[in-house]
Amino acid sequence: MPTLKPDPPYEPFIPHPNNRLMALTSNCNDMPTLFIDTHAPLDVLMDAANYRIRAVIQVLENMCMRGSVECDSIILSDFAQLCVIPLRDGCDVLDVIGKRLRTQA
């Protein structure tokens, strides 16, 4: 069985306006692993934002059609977190689109 080697020391990601990659705000700690390519074509960025936001809309619409849904606060908190992550990702992508459109104007 191979011996595991420790990872090299972590160099923190330092956001910079000229960086091509922007860390998503939904990263779960100060070591981001999920990023947006800010130089991606606008239509690709729009598709990414649209996909995430519409996925949450679909889940929420399905919940509305069920009538009364009884659950405890822990389940409700988990469900809210499930919805918040893709919504925040979609909004992050929309922020990138907005910045790009403002620089083109």
Image: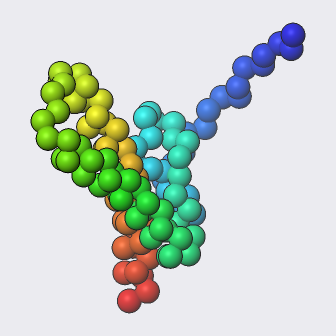
Q: Quadrant of residue 99?
A: bottom left
Is 79 drawn above or below residue 18 in the view shown? above
* 27 left or right, relative to 58: right
In depth, the one of 13 and 65 nearer the eye is 65
Residue at 44% x, 76% y: name it. Answer: 100
Q: Residue furthest top?
A: 1
The one of 62 and 2 positioned closer to us in this rendering:
62
Task: Please say whether residue 94 is visible from this viewpoint.
Answer: yes
Q: Is residue 21 left or right of residue 84?
A: right
- Residue 17 lies, in percent from the top left, at 47, 64
Question: In what quadrant of the picture does the C terminus appear?
Answer: bottom left
Residue 97 position within the rendered picture, expressed as x and y whole percent measured from the top left: 42, 72
Q: Residue at x 48, y 62 (%)?
A: 48
How is colour applied across the structure in the image? rainbow
> Which residue reaches farthest left?
68
Q: Point out the residue furthest to the right here.
A: 1
* Left or right: 85 as drawn, with respect to 75: right
Residue at the outermost front position: 66
In the image, what residue occupies the spot 50% across and 76% down? 43
Q: Is residue 18 visible?
A: no
Q: Residue at x 78, y 16 (%)?
A: 4
Which quadrant: the N terminus? top right
Residue 77 at x, y percent in the picture: 24, 29
Nearer the observer, 31 or 81:
81
Residue 19 on image: x %, y %: 55, 62
Q: Number of marks in the image?
A: 0
Q: Please say if 84 is above or below 21.
A: above
